[in-house]
Amino acid sequence: MARKAKNKLLKKAKKSKSDEFYTQLCDIESELRYYKTHFKDKVVYCNCDDPRISKFFKYFAINFEELGIKKLLTSCYREQTGELFGEQNQDSGFFFEYTNTDEEKSKLNSPEIKLFKGDGDFRSSESIELLKKSDIVVTNPPFSLFREYVEQLVRYDKKFLIIGNVNAITYKEIFKLIKENRAWLGINLGRGVSGFIVPEHYELYGTEARINEFGDRIVSPNNCLWLTNLDTFKRHEDILLTKKYFGNEHQYPKYDNYDGINVNRTEDIPLDYEGAMGVPITFLHKFNPDQFELIKFRKGNDEKDLSINGKCPYFRILVKNKRVKIQSESVNTYNKSFNTGMLKRAS
Ligand SMILES: C[S@@+](CC[C@H](N)C(=O)[O-])C[C@H]1O[C@@H](n2cnc3c(N)ncnc32)[C@H](O)[C@@H]1O
């Protein structure tokens, strides 16, 4: 086989392998505790989840009453069935509806699943029927289909809280949603998602790979985020700014191909700069839409990567501080009325 084709195959295999990362209960708990008020009287759907193994299903079943959930739906893709059980893959996907009755509670460890006619793909008509009946979708979807997965949630106008790779921010479709305030980052990011359970046949790689107290094989890629359109306290908190541009201009070089300054770290964003600033993508983790406006991603006026003296810093997001304008406007108004007062008194 030609080398190029082989590399392509390897890349594909690697990509689909990371689709089999199963989320740990501890990571679900540490994110979900910030969204409790959103679930009251809602139908929750985990559409990439086998209720026999999914910790998302477990979390919502255990906390069903406390959260006030109306119904819990889960559905599972056929290739997922048996992944962790070492079973032969079956032909059909399946689904499960849970309303927390005493009978259902007593059978939590062996839920009575129902077979789909098809494979349970989240894009299949059967899965979409369940999606239509739901209010909030919460899961860790296949990484390789992330764009398509989010696009479907948006198309059906669903609330969601999902896990993705940090790089997802750099996908133009996802950045567009963030820019338009139709999606934002959740609370935990990077090391804040402690690791994923991987199947038996999966290589345990990385210095933090381990087997946990339940015997689960864990790898920690430390490169994940939560993406959501559920409100949290965090996106209403201002980033504390302490640095100044005026007097320190040399620390903030201007771009060759955009009228804006480069800022290497979110904490170095100057509090007195009104124009465009290029900040690292991790800025989005602290982004408060009342404080900042997102203008553009990565490219200058020439649609080439932003550059400084010909060199391109790693992906930058162009932002503007809304408060600086407000501040300078109120200073101007103050100056104006002060001057008018002086003139009146003088005359
Ligand atoms: C990253 S894993 C996470 C599994 C589970 N949601 C969890 O968090 O533990 C993504 C799952 O989606 C399944 N999957 C892959 N392609 C799918 C598709 N087209 N439709 C639905 N599920 C799919 C994979 O088999 C895999 O089990």
Image (tube, helix red, strand yellow):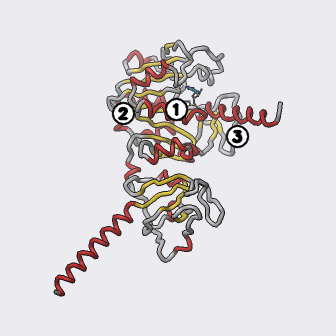
Which of the two discs, 2 and 1, sits closer to the camera? 1
Position of residue 109 in the picture relative to residue 13 (left or right): left
Instruction: Residue 220 in the image: state x and y as whole percent.
Output: 62, 42
| Residue behind mark 3 | 205
User: Which image quarter has ligand 1?
Assistant: top right
- Name the one closer to the observer, 279 or 52: 279
- Name the one closer to the observer, 228 or 9: 9
Q: CA distance from mark 2 to mark 1?
A: 21 Å
Amino acid type, label 3: Tyr
- The kind of secondary structure element at disc 3 is loop
Which of the two discs, 3 and 1, sits closer to the camera? 1
* Residue furthest bottom as drawn: 346
Label placed on residue 149: 1
Label placed on residue 296: none
Q: Few, some or many C-alpha atoms within 10 Å of disc 3 (few <14, some 14-19, many ≥20)?
A: few
- Name the one closer to the observer, 278 or 86: 278
